Structures are given as C-alpha cells and as structure tokens.
Image (cartoon, rainbow, N blue to C red):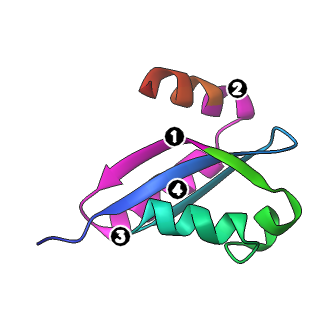
Amino acid sequence: MDKKFYVYILQTEDNKLYCGYTDDVKKRFEAHQNGTGAKYTKAHRPLKIVYNKEFSTKSEAMKEEYRIKHLTRTQKMELITNSN
C-alpha cells in the first residue's frame, strides 16, 4: 500500500487559517487540538479542518504547503470555497 500525504488548512477559534502537511490528517488534527501539533496552534486553538488535498509524495505535499502559505487570506478562502 502506497503512503499518501496531505496538505490541510485549519480554521482556528480566532478565525485564523493554519496550513500544514501530514500523512495522517485525523491524527495531526488531534495533535493540534491537544496543543502538541505546532507552536502556532498552541496559541490559536483549531476548530475544524476546512481544506485537505491528497498527494502521492511528501515532496509534492510540501511544495503545495509552501505555495498555500504564500497566498493571501482571500486567495486561501477562494481555495477552500472552490474545493467544496
């Protein structure tokens, strides 16, 4: 079985967006909720996953994460809206 990688965007309690990548979205989200996922989400508690996309390689996922992190909030919201 091939390992899959994911890029995800979380919405936080204070309506911020956080982007990351992982090989297990559910496990990573739980880590963020527990305060062990990232320094940012320790201070900005995540409410829900608003976007995720699957990739076949870690490299592809990391490149997409980098691209998304450089988008404006408006562009990120468009990405989220268009994915649903």
Q: Are marks 2 and 1 in contact (CB under 8 Å)?
A: no
Q: Position of residue 54 (x, y in %)?
A: 33, 51
**Amino acid tagged 3:** Lys
Secondary structure beneath label 1: strand
* Apparent side of residue 42 relative to residue 73 in the rendered image (left or right): right
Q: Which numbered dot is residue 74?
A: 2
Q: Against 10, is 24 above or below? A: below
Comes first in the chain, label 1 or label 4: 1
Comes first in the chain, label 3 or label 4: 3
Picture quadrant where residue 76 is located: top right
Q: CA distance from mark 1 to mark 4?
A: 12 Å
Please give the range of residues in magenta.
49-76
Q: CA distance from mark 2 to mark 3?
A: 26 Å
Secondary structure beneath label 3: helix
Q: CA distance from mark 3 to mark 1?
A: 17 Å
Q: Dot 3, crowdedness within 10 Å: few (<14), some or many (≥20)?
A: some
Comes first in the chain, label 3 or label 1: 1
